[in-house]
């Protein structure tokens, strides 16, 4: 439950007591000329000005920009009306505009609908009125129109309409340039003699209005009049010298208000009481909270509301403006102790003050209490204790046994004795005798600031070092989890159920359970408490607080729910929210008025004007700022990737008490707890995590009741593409595939390395076989031929046989050398010392000389073409071995007569051609690439492939054989201009021409 005033503008209060607030262009209003005011059902207040339309939520004016055909972006708004369906209708100087109800809170100009009754002045709207049957009546500068079915029907042509009202019987009461017209449908109702009764001319009637009681009011150039039961009643002054009255307004409570050229007035009986004098008025309206809104001609927008708290000061009869303590006695009198001002009593109209001249030797009154017999006990600062009865004061001080002359509090015990809290200890006064208690008796401190006797008779003491409880004739401390060091004030009090509470200004409020202080609320700065039916009232350093007892107990459950309480401060009429620290500083009288001492006067709150309300507050997210760009919030917020700064501005709709709305907010996934909003009403976030988060907002209404469910506003932070789930999944898959691929590549590489090593071994074995074939086997084969020749010659020519044996021996020695060289070549490939030409010439001559037993030995010839160039050493060695294999086969197996070798040094390639005219190669052997059991031809091709050469072989039986070895210049020559890179063993596809 919460509190709210039943009447925001109380007609029983003096008009000067109302609270007036003025809003101008400095506060955000588009213009200080206000022509129309209306509140729509969503709670917003709409203001039509000379510079356009404004929407107001109690804190902020929002300009509404709309533009239609034949209108400027912002024109004069002269009339406002809410339709039966909640749509807002706007009368402007350039036509009629309708804003659908669903877009009123988040205005979209594209959804506005524009209508035009006619051209020129027919399009200048002067007034709007919805009749009870839902028809819209439009007054313009050129006539009266009835709007229906999206078309205008002319009712009164060629007349300027200034006002439209409706009587109880449904007749229209129209003020026009033709005078007063009453319409019953389309029939004009005449009023003969009315002008004479009012004492005015036809142009002197400005407004005709029928109130809820049936009285008809007439606003005329002569003044205000009304017709009740057929008779005219005039309000004074009226007639010559009277003030002209232009308009009358009846608020929701039925109170009539009128305005004239000299201001706005409240109708009080038969008099006009000035409310806001000296102001030119153009519009008046009341909202559903009871506030009265006044549109002026150049002074802006005014809000008039009742003053909940009335302040009594020196101007009202108090001796000064600093009352310290207040007490309501059982006889209904109100007593006020003033700081160095004496003791005052209030009789309901004025104050009477007692001071030093009346026997109160110390006028600094800080404590009051009423004795069993109705006597008044007065505690002073450095003046001791006084008893006041029958107009006389009796003094008790330290000389009489009081523990100290600074009296902070007085408690009247059930037996009539007094307990007095002083700065020097605690005194118990029985029949004028004192028994004092100090730290030696168990008190935590001699500085005693409060004393209280509970319903069970227990004595409790508040000191500057904590709370103590009397046990027997001694005191024991009440345990607390928090250290209390020299607080500004401690007081004690019970609620209606008997629960005892300890209040500390810097600490808050604790409940005393047994011998333990249990925290209740440590956020409020509280000084004292009193009870009223169903409620607890607290004073504090920041105003007055009210808890319903049910809500107060509920908020002690330790749940994450903010406490429900109403707060009263400067917006309620207090001159200062700081309450005084006398005891007691608050009292409730038998007339249900709450009196509170403040540092700027005595505050009075009439509890009979307070009612309970639990309406939910109307809250919303108003706008957002992303980076430096600000825009309307809409229904959700989507942030682009990389957003690092977001501001969410929220607000509420409270036209009368926006300062009382308290907010808490929390973003799921970001804020671990609910956060209290400051006065900026803005939540600032940096680096919101990816995804959608609910920004939750909750608030209390103007009476302090929290809507714990609140609202939720979705905020989505979009990711960069590399922050998306699919990208992360793809990255994980890519990583897994990369690992898998790398693993498989590693396995492949390991297999390739093993295969390469295996192939190297095979190639090495193959090369060894070629070396053995080309060296040892060839040499041994030659030696065998010589030895065979020697055997054949031995019987017939011994000398020649000896020579052949010597040659065979030399050949064997050469084979040994070749074997040694081949073995050395297994470790290091070396090239013969001479160039290829010399090597081939020497080889040919040697082979030609070693042809034993032939009658027609083969002749050898070598030719060289082109400029000689050095071959690469390793490549030359391979060319030499290929040539030797071919020449050896030609000399030993071809049975040729001529064997030729041709070397050609070309700029593009090196060519070696060897031909003979012998028996040729068997085509089947040439096709198969080798002869069974022989490795000569395969070895030649392997060597050619190894050095990247092309080997071409032509052969024909009994014609001869020709072999050509072609090596690109970039591979063959040791230095070549065309070399871009060097690869010794480059694989090339060979072509064999048969």
Image (spheres, rainbow, N blue to C red):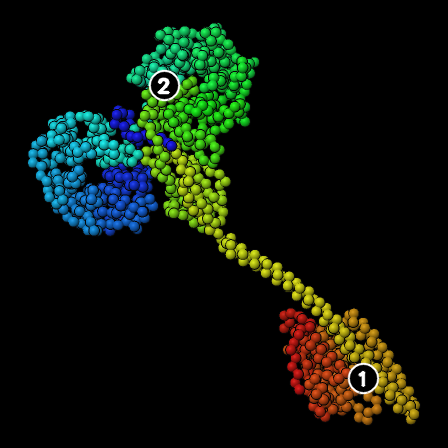
In the image shown, does 93 or 787 lie closer to the viewer? 93
**Quadrant in the picture for the C terminus:** bottom right
What secondary structure is marked by label 2?
loop
**Quadrant in the picture for the N terminus:** top left
Looking at the rendered structure, which numbered label has been put on residue 861? none
Residue 955 falls in image quadrant = bottom right
Vertical position of residue 567 compared to residue 929: above or below? above
Question: Can residue 709 be seen from the camera position used here?
Answer: yes
Between disc 2 and disc 1, the foreground one is 2
In the image shown, does 144 or 565 lie closer to the viewer? 565
Vertical position of residue 530 compared to residue 105: above or below? above
Q: Which residue is mark 1?
A: 846
Residue 436 picture location, percent across and down: 51, 11
Determine the residue positioned at 33% across, 28% down: 610
Vertical position of residue 842 compared to residue 324: above or below? below
In the image shown, does 733 or 322 lie closer to the viewer? 733
What secondary structure is marked by label 1?
helix
Determine the residue positioned at 84% across, 79% down: 814
CB-based contact (under 8 Å), mark 2 and mark 1: no
Looking at the rendered structure, which numbered label has been put on residue 321? 2
Vertical position of residue 826 compared to residue 477: above or below? below
Q: Is residue 607 left or right of residue 778?
A: left
Residue 802 falls in image quadrant = bottom right
Question: Can residue 840 be seen from the camera position used here?
Answer: no
Residue 432 picture location, percent across and down: 46, 7
Residue 512 picture location, percent across and down: 50, 24
Q: Is residue 762 left or right of residue 20?
A: right
Label 2 and label 1: CA atoms lie apart by 142 Å
In the image shown, does 186 or 234 lie closer to the viewer? 186
Callout 2 environment at 10 Å: few (<14), some (14 to 19), or many (20+)? Answer: many
């Amino acid at each position: 439950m919460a509190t709210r005033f039943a009447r925001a503008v109380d007609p029983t209060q003096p008009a000067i007591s109302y609270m007036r607030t003025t809003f101008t262009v400095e506060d955000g209003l588009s213009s200080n000329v206000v022509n129309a005011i209306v509140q729509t059902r969503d709670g917003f207040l709409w203001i039509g000005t000379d510079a356009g339309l404004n929407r107001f939520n109690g804190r902020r004016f929002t300009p509404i920009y709309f533009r239609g055909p034949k209108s400027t972006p912002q024109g004069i708004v002269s009339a406002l009306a809410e339709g039966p369906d909640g749509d807002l209708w706007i009368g402007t100087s350039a036509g009629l505009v309708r804003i659908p109800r669903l877009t009123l809170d988040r205005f979209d100009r594209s959804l506005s609908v524009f209508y035009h009754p006619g051209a020129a002045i027919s399009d200048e709207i002067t007034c709007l009125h919805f009749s009870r049957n839902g028809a819209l009546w439009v007054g313009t500068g050129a006539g009266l129109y009835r709007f229906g079915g999206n078309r205008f029907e002319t009712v009164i042509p060629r007349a300027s309409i200034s006002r439209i009202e409706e009587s109880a019987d449904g007749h229209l009461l129209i003020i026009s340039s033709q005078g007063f017209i009453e319409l019953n449908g389309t029939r004009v109702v005449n009023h003969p003699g009315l002008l004479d009764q009012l004492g005015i001319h036809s142009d002197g009637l400005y407004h005709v209005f029928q109130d809820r009681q049936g009285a008809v009011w007439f606003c005329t150039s002569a003044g205000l009049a009304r017709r009740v039961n057929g008779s005219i009643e005039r309000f004074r002054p009226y007639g010559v010298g009277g003030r002209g009255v232009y308009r009358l307004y009846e608020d929701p409570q039925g109170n009539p208000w009128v305005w004239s050229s000299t201001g706005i007035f409240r109708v009080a009986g038969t008099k006009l009481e000035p409310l806001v004098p000296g102001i030119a008025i153009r519009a008046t309206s009341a909202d559903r909270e009871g506030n009265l809104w006044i549109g002026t001609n150049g002074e802006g927008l005014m809000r008039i509301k009742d003053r909940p708290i009335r302040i009594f000061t020196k101007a009202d009869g108090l001796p000064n403006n600093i009352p310290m303590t207040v007490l309501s006695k059982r006889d209904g009198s109100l007593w006020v102790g003033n700081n160095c001002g004496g003791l005052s009593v209030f009789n309901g109209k004025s104050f009477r003050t007692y001071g030093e001249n009346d026997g109160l030797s110390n006028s600094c009154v800080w404590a009051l209490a009423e004795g069993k017999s109705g006597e008044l006990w007065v505690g002073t600062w450095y003046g001791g204790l006084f008893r006041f009865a029958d107009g006389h004061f009796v003094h008790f001080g330290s000389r009489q046994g009081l523990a100290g002359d600074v009296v902070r509090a007085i408690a009247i015990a059930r037996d009539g004795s007094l307990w007095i809290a002083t700065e020097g200890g605690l005194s118990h006064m029985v029949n004028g005798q004192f028994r004092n208690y100090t730290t030696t008796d168990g008190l935590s401190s001699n500085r005693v600031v409060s004393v209280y006797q509970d319903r069970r008779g227990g004595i409790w003491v508040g000191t500057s070092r904590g709370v103590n409880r009397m046990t027997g004739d001694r005191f024991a401390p009440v345990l607390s989890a928090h250290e209390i060091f020299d607080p500004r004030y401690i007081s004690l009090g019970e609620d209606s159920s008997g629960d005892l509470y300890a209040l500390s200004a810097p600490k808050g409020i604790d409940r005393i359970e047994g011998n333990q202080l249990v925290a209740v609320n440590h956020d409020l700065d509280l000084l004292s408490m009193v009870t009223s039916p169903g409620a607890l009232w607290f004073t504090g350093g920041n105003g007055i607080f009210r808890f319903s007892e049910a809500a107060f107990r509920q908020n002690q459950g330790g749940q994450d729910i903010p406490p429900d309480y109403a707060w009263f401060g400067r917006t309620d009429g207090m001159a200062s929210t700081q309450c005084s620290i006398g005891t007691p500083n608050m009292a409730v009288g038998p007339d249900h008025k709450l009196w509170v001492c403040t540092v700027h006067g005595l505050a009075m709150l009439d509890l009979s004007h307070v009612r309970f309300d639990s309406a939910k507050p109307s809250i919303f997210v108003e706008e957002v700022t992303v980076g430096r760009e600000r825009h309307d919030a809409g229904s959700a917020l989507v942030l682009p990737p990389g957003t690092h700064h977001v501001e969410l501005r929220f607000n509420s709709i409270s036209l009368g008490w926006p300062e009382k709305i308290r907010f808490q907010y929390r973003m799921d996934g970001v804020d671990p707890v609910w956060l209290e909003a400051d006065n900026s009403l803005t939540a600032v976030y940096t680096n919101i995590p990816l995804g959608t988060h609910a920004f939750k907002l909750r608030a209390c209404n103007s009476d302090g009741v929290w809507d714990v469910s609140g609202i939720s506003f979705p905020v989505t932070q979009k990711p960069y593409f590399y922050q998306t789930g699919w990208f992360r999944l793809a990255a994980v898959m890519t990583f897994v595939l990369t690992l898998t691929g790398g693993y498989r590549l590693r396995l492949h590489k390991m297999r390739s390395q093993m295969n390469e090593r295996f192939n190297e071994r095979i190639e090495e074995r193959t090369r060894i076989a070629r070396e053995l074939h080309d060296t040892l086997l060839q040499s041994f084969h030659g030696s065998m031929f010589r030895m065979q020749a020697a055997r054949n010659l031995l019987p017939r020519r011994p000398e020649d046989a000896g020579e052949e044996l010597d040659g065979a021996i030399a050949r064997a020695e050469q084979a040994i050398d070749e074997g040694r060289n081949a073995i050395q070549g297994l470790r290091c490939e070396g090239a013969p010392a001479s160039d290829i030409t010399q090597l081939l010439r020497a080889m040919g001559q040697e082979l030609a000389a070693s042809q034993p037993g032939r009658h027609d030995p083969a002749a050898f010839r070598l030719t060289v073409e082109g400029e000689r160039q050095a071959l690469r050493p390793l490549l030359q060695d391979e060319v030499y071995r290929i040539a030797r294999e071919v020449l050896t086969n030609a000399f030993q197996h071809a049975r040729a007569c001529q064997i030729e070798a041709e070397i050609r040094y070309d700029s593009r390639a090196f060519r070696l051609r060897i031909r003979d005219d012998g028996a040729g190669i068997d085509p089947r052997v040439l096709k198969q690439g080798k002869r069974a059991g022989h490795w000569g031809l395969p070895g030649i091709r392997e060597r050619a492939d190894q050095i990247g050469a092309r080997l071409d072989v032509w052969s024909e039986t009994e014609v001869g054989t020709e072999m050509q070895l072609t090596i690109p210049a970039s591979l063959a020559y040791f230095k070549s201009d065309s070399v871009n890179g060097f690869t010794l063993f480059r694989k090339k596809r060979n072509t064999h021409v048969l």
